[in-house]
Amino acid sequence: MQPLAIRTLSFALIALASAAVAEPKREFGGFSSHPRDLQVFLDYIHSLEMSKVEAGIKLRSAIKAIPVESDIVLTSTQEAGLRDWLYDLLVAFSSSGSDSLAAAFYLREGVTNLGKLKKIKSNLQDWGLLKGERPFDLFQAMHRSILNHQDYEYRFGNVSFLHSAFSTFEIQGRYESYLSYARANGMVVAGGLYMDKSKLQKEVEEAVQAGDQRILSQFMFITEEPAEFAKSKRPIRTPFFFQLVWDSERTMWHFLEMFYNSDLPHFFQFSAM
């Protein structure tokens, strides 16, 4: 299937590209790698009307309005969980958030990558940045140290859900990462960053190969960096892509992977979860 979050944006970009100089081969969602086409892409997402990321009913209502495209019938718990996950993500990394909210968001699923965390913990201790021993203290320190290094106080300034949709489906027999799909459909612009939860991805892949089923959800939204921390006159905007998997035992969604097309160094700690 084609996730609506990619397909809808791709249609919009192809329509815009038709007004540009014709190219024999189109990539990146309807745009070639030629700088002229990439600039059209950037101009388009900068033309979108954005809303401030701020905790409250306005943001919840905007997320509630995002359509769900599903091959299966979602339960009310599953659909509410998707919307809550996105709301909590945006708030945790916005001006409404805090180091504590960011750490709590990372730890909502528990910790599995103990080897990577041990190395990060050692580095933070050597730098004098870790003030406690709990996983919460570690994620809180990681979040703050990265923000300080990049002269940011938070990540998400504004957001657009114009081309957003929760594309949800059941897989069996074969697992395909969201990034692989995006690359095959030309939605990965040069300079993008990618993060995943590789252990969980492997578990999903092994489960479906063994004949089990898993429910995945993929979605995209466009964000703009906080204007007060922007290094250029025009704050950078980028589409963010996420893939989650449903945990039927704990009745919650788990992060699988994310990627985004941007020159903006927005580093997150999802791979350390």
Image (cartoon, grey):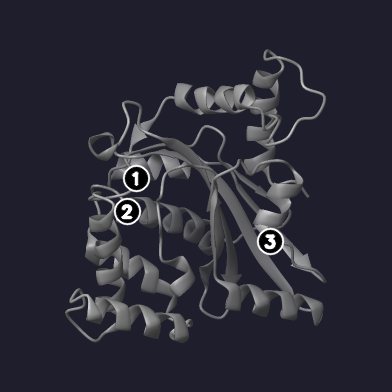
Which residue does the numbered mark 2 point to in the structure image?
93
Which residue does the numbered mark 1 point to in the structure image?
156
Residue 264 position in % (x across, y down): 42, 44
Residue kind at label 3, given as amino acid type: Ser
Rendered image quadrant of residue 228: top left
Q: Is residue 255 left or right of residue 212?
A: left
Residue kind at label 1, given as amino acid type: Phe
As measured in the structure, the alpha-carbon distance from the residue carrying label 3 to the one carrying label 2 is 25 Å
Q: Is residue 198 left or right of residue 122?
A: right
Nearest to N terminus: mark 3 or mark 1? 1
Q: Is residue 256 above or below residue 136?
A: above
As measured in the structure, the alpha-carbon distance from the residue carrying label 3 to the one carrying label 1 is 25 Å
Badge 2, how many Cα within 10 Å: few under 14, some, many 20+? many
Image quarter (top left, top right, bottom left or bottom right) of the C terminus? bottom left
Residue 135: image tag? none
Label 3's element?
loop
Residue in view at x 45 percent, y 80 percent: 116
Q: Pick the residue in front: 53 or 170.
A: 53
